[in-house]
Image (cartoon, grey):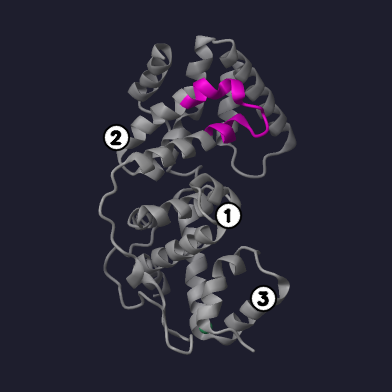
Amino acid sequence: MALTRELSAETRQVNGENTSRVVVSAAADKELVDSLRRGEEASYESLVRSFGPQVLAITRRYLKSEADAADCFQETFIAVFKGIDTYAGQSSLRQWVRGIAINQSLMALRKRKRAREESIEHMMPLFDDSGSRVESAGEHQRSSIEAEIDTASLKVSVRQGIDKLPDDFRVVLLLRDIDGLNTRETAAILGIELNAVKTRLHRARTALRYILQPVFGASKS
Amino acid sequence: MMLTCKEFDDFMVDYLGDGLPVWQKYMCWLHVKMCRECAHFVREYKRTIDLGKAAFDDQGDQVPDSVPEELIRAALAHRKNN
Ligand SMILES: [Zn+2]
């Protein structure tokens, strides 16, 4: 089916979309949205199969637990099906679905009972009374994660490091550094001040840097 | 008048994200040039950001090739029931 082919072509695209592909994607979006609005059964399946992998990756990223991610996957597509009439075509359908997946994940996080979280205070840099950096926090901590440096295990180490951050910090880091929202968009989606976004982002990156010290140590040698 | 390390640290997100007026950006740049500790910190901080992005590269191993069939079936069944 032509539509499925076009959508899977879009799935493979990364950055630097060329104009013709954008046109193809826009046409495929319109065709799919029209058939969803007409209530054609096959189009729902096409949507879930095309966008499902991306949605599942997002819900897993924010929710960590596989069961929560699966529940949120369902909630996302329910919201997409219900909201398809409101899709105005200002962003690509993929971007729109992605936004809904992120929103649903954040809602699920808010509802979830919070596990006890470790403070990240000891991961922050130290300054003396004159404001000079005393030492880069974490330089003496070398053993909490594996220091293997091949790409696959490095990715796993980094993801595990991010998962160790308290949710308030982890979510801001995911929204800003991974999902590419700007400060204003992040503040809006979380309902917090711009400065709070910046502070949380800085503390999240600083704590992650602390957690990743074994990686830096290994790559230096 | 040079920024202290603490003052520079407070500007870090804006400094790396193009959110600073030219003069403040210059003051931060100057601090990094003059301060070995902060230069080291910035290097690792930037690498941390890059590693984070790479770890969740959407074209890499974080997007599952396929979604478990039962999840797809459940999503479609949900729609019919609602
Ligand atoms: Zn300094």
> In the image, which disc is placed on residue A183?
1
Q: Is residue A1 left or right of residue B71?
A: right
Residue at figure coordinates x 29%, y 48% from the top left: A114
Comparing labels 3 and 2, the label whose residue is closer to the camera = 3
Residue at figure coordinates x 56%, y 57% from the top left: A194
Disc 1/disc 2 C-alpha distance (Å): 30 Å
**A2 and B53: which one is in front?**
B53
Magenta-colored stretch includes residue A124? no
Q: Decide which of tag 1 and tag 2 comes sooner along the chain.
A: 2
Disc 3/disc 2 C-alpha distance (Å): 47 Å
Amino acid at dot 1 = Thr
Instruction: Please identify the quarter of the rendering in which residue A106 is found.
Output: top left
**A29 and A131: which one is in front?**
A131
Q: Is residue B72 visible?
A: yes
The chain letter for the residue carrying disc 3 is B
Disc 3 packing (10 Å; few <14; some 14–19; many ≥20): some
Decide: marks 1, 2 in contact (CB < 8 A)? no
Residue at figure coordinates x 39%, y 58% from the top left: A150
The chain letter for the residue carrying disc 1 is A
Q: Which residues are magenta?
A: A79-97
Mark 2 lies on a secondary structure that is: helix
**Residue position for label 3:** B24
Comparing labels 1 and 2, the label whose residue is closer to the camera = 1
**Residue position for label 2:** A67
Are both tags, 1 and 3, on one chain?
Answer: no
> In the image, which disc is placed on residue A137?
none
Disc 1/disc 3 C-alpha distance (Å): 19 Å
Q: Quarter holding the C terminus of chain A? A: bottom left
